[in-house]
Amino acid sequence: MALSRVRRDSGMNYWPGFVDALSTLVLSVIFLLTVFMVAQFLLMQDIAGKDTALARLNAQISRLSQLLSLETGNKTDLESQVAQLRASLSAAQDERDKLRGGAAGPAPADNQGQVDTLNSQIDVQKEATARALAQITNLNEQIRALRSQIAALQEALGTSEKSNKDSQLQIADLGQRLNLALAQRVQELTRYRSDFFGKLREILGNRPDIRVVGDRFVFQSELFFDSGTASLRPEGTAELDKVATAVLDLQKQIPPEINWVLRVDGHTDVRPLGAASQFKTNWDLSAARAISVVQYLITRGIPPQRLVAAGFGEFQPIDPGTTDEAYNRNRRIELKLTER
């Protein structure tokens, strides 16, 4: 309680704590996003490689299956040929036995000639049968080798598919954890920003010409400038002195690796300038006013490299109306602390 009371009394000490918290949150979110993107890239590369390997394995299995089907067909044809050769061989042997058994004495010359011919045919058929059986044995070995290769490829395919599924689950889990972490960081950042806006309102005062809109502080142009001019009024410099003091105190607390800037945005209403104005367009006027604020802050000690001046003319209204109140709201100077 005492610490909180001291902080409220000191007025300007809200900046270091806010910026430290904000920079820590921003760096944490950037780190989480970097980790997620790197992990996702590596996982996607791994998945792409595994998909390629799966395609190769499937192609190899398809080719081996075709070879297996072809070899099986060849084996069937050879087995059919062997069966036919064996049938022919058996028929020839039966005919030879009949010719030999038909003569009680010496075989007539014509029968002996037939027997010799049949013996020659039997020898040829035996050789053909032996060659066919040898081919069948060779085909059986090739078929066993092909089946072994197919089994090994199918096992590798199953392993790759499981690994691919695991990688997909890792990506989904990583995405869920990142979303949860980012949601927590956003909640913390929202809370810190709310505290920061409340503190700054206490310092600048609860004035209708100073508002908080989103992530920036909005000052009505009339607080700083007379109508149609870009020269700072004394009342405006007093408010800018408060801002400059806070920024200088902030600069001492921000780590050097954070490349921060204070952006000053000038805005006008949609009505054209009069013929006597020194500025040709509202864009010129808005830019000149932003530059005047930046130049004054430089005289208060803020480094030029930490300041940005931007003119938006009438092209970024916050009130689309055409009443005097809407015009007053759109004529404004906005200050935003951001990264370069």
Image (cartoon, helix red, strand yellow):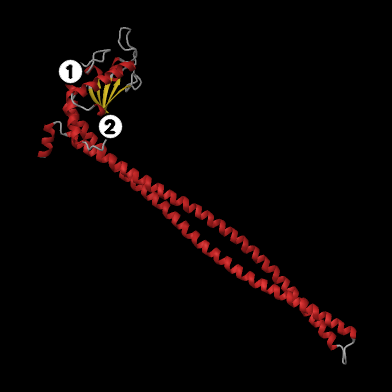
Residue 93, position as x, y percentages in the image: 79, 82
Q: Quadrant of residue 106?
A: bottom right
Disc 2 residue crowd, few under 14, some 14–19, many 20+, Cα 10 Å: few
Judging depth in this view, the residue of 138 and 289 nearest the camera is: 138
Judging depth in this view, the residue of 59 and 301 nearest the camera is: 301
Residue at image mark 1: 235
The amino acid type, in three-letter code, at marker 2 is Thr
Q: Label 2, label 1: how many angstroms apart (C-alpha)?
A: 26 Å
Q: Residue furthest left?
A: 2
> Is residue 150 found left or right of 229 in the rendered image?
right
> Is residue 197 found left or right of 76 in the rendered image?
left
Taking the image as drawn, is residue 181 in sight? Answer: yes
Write the residue at 10% across / 35% down: 6
Instruction: Please identify the quadrant where the N terminus is shown.
Output: top left
The amino acid type, in three-letter code, at marker 1 is Glu
Residue 314, position as x, y percentages in the image: 34, 18
Q: Quick check: 138 above or below 333?
A: below
Residue 286, position as x, y percentages in the image: 30, 18
Residue at image mark 2: 338
Q: Quadrant of residue 3?
A: top left
